[in-house]
């Protein structure tokens, strides 16, 4: 469904929604009307609005996309430290994924009392105001990983969307993996591999306690969909090689853009580019509850 939204809010507030702002005018002495246009379809769970006393800064990506960054006016001194590396992340992911950013612009705004770290609403990511920090606070808690994760979802989850929760790793595993790739560009190789080591240790601990889950389990845990999903992609990349992996991801997103997808659809794009038999990989990573710790950790040596 393509969503176009019209919001009527008090004049002293700004209003954000999915898509591009096409009209803004005064309704009366106290209210303004804001109209947002989406040009492409998206899933209904990605509809979002945010209203507040905002100020905005805009950067332009290398491909010409507007990157709109919002903060409450009272927090305006924290723009740089909160949104540090945003343009770098955007440029890297668009180039790495190989598919042009699929929406009209990209907006980000912090919200209060948010249950999660962030939410990848189409073209309007919202994130916890706990990540609104100064340069000192940035050292202890920053938005970089969440920033990259939610942006990756604009492709993985928004451009293509799972048919049901059995395939939820296509959202979260991909977003987790590509966020770490973006962070590797910023923080380096040691950071990247240490994060995968931490993921492996957490997965091994759960598996050793008999709490491991297969990746294609409906309603599995976050550890499964996020960290095990990222590991499944890391491992697949090593099996088939970077060139095949990147081309398969690009073909997958292009072929099924704005559609619902399954794991088989993704794997079919991989298999179309390689003669390797991937039956063991699919069994070990998609259908087995235990985490393949020995195989995984060997990749980090």
Image (cartoon, grey):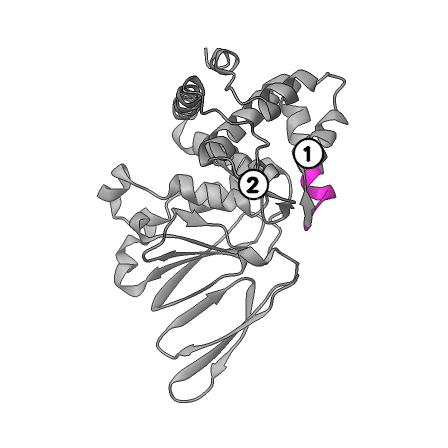
Q: Between residue 283 and residue 197, name the one nearer to us.
A: 283
Magenta range: 252-258
In what quadrant of the picture does the N terminus appear?
bottom right
Is the residue 170 above or below the residue 242 in the image? below
State the residue at coordinates (71%, 36%): 265
Residue 29 image point, x, y percent: 39, 89
Determine the residue positioned at 48% across, 34% down: 226
97 with respect to 34 (left or right): right
Residue 286 lies in what quarter of the image? Answer: top right
Q: Please say if the residues under marks 2 and 1 sit with CB atoms less than 8 Å apart.
A: no
Report helix, strand or loop for mark 2.
Answer: helix
Q: Residue furthest bottom?
A: 28
Q: Is any part of residue 54 visible from this angle?
A: yes
Q: Which residue in the structure is indicated by mark 1?
A: 266
Q: State which quadrant residue 247 falls in.
A: top right
Q: Which mark is residue 253?
A: none
Alpha-carbon span between mark 2 and mark 1: 12 Å
Is the C terminus in the top left, top right, bottom left or bottom right quadrant?
Answer: top left
Residue sticking out furthest to the front: 210
Image position of 212 with respect to 52: above or below: above
Residue 171, disc: 2
In x, y percent, where is residue 186? 41, 33
**Where is residue 7 drawn, in percent x and y?**
49, 74
Does the image show residue 88?
Answer: no
Is residue 99 highlighted in magenta?
no
Instruction: Point out the tag, 2 or 1, that comes first from the N-terminus.
Output: 2
Q: Is residue 134 above or below residue 32?
A: above
Residue closest to the eye, 74 or 1 = 1
Secondary structure category for the residue under label 1? helix
Residue 91, placed above or below residue 217: below
Q: Position of residue 221 (x, y in %)?
A: 47, 35
């Amino acid at each position: 469904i393509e969503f176009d939204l019209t919001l009527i809010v008090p004049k002293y507030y700004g209003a954000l929604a999915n898509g591009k702002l096409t009209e803004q005018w005064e309704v009366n002495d106290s209210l303004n009307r804001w109209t947002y246009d989406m040009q492409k379809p998206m899933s209904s769970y990605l509809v979002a609005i945010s209203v507040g006393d905002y100020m905005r800064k805009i950067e332009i990506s290398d491909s010409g996309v507007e990157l709109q960054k919002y903060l409450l006016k009272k927090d305006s001194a924290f723009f740089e430290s909160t949104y540090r590396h945003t343009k770098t992340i955007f440029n890297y992911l668009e180039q790495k994924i190989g598919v042009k950013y699929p929406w009209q612009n990209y907006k980000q705004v912090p919200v209060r009392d948010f249950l999660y770290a962030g939410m990848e609403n189409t073209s309007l990511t919202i994130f916890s105001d706990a990540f609104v920090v100064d340069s000192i606070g940035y050292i202890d808690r920053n938005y970089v990983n969440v920033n990259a994760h939610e942006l990756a979802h604009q492709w993985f989850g928004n451009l293509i969307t799972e048919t049901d929760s059995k395939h939820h790793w296509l959202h979260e595993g991909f977003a987790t993996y590509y966020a770490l790739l973006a962070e590797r560009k910023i923080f380096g190789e040691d950071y990247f591999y240490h994060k995968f080591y931490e993921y492996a240790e957490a997965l091994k601990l759960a598996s050793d306690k008999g709490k491991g889950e297969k990746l294609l389990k409906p309603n599995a845990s976050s550890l499964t969909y996020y960290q095990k999903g990222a590991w499944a992609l890391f491992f697949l990349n090593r099996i088939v090689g970077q060139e095949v992996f990147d081309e398969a991801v690009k073909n997958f997103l292009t072929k099924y853009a704005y559609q619902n997808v399954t794991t088989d659809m993704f794997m079919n794009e991989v298999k179309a580019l390689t003669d390797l038999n991937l039956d063991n990989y699919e069994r070990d990573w998609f259908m087995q509850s235990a985490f393949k710790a020995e195989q995984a950790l060997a990749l980090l040596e």
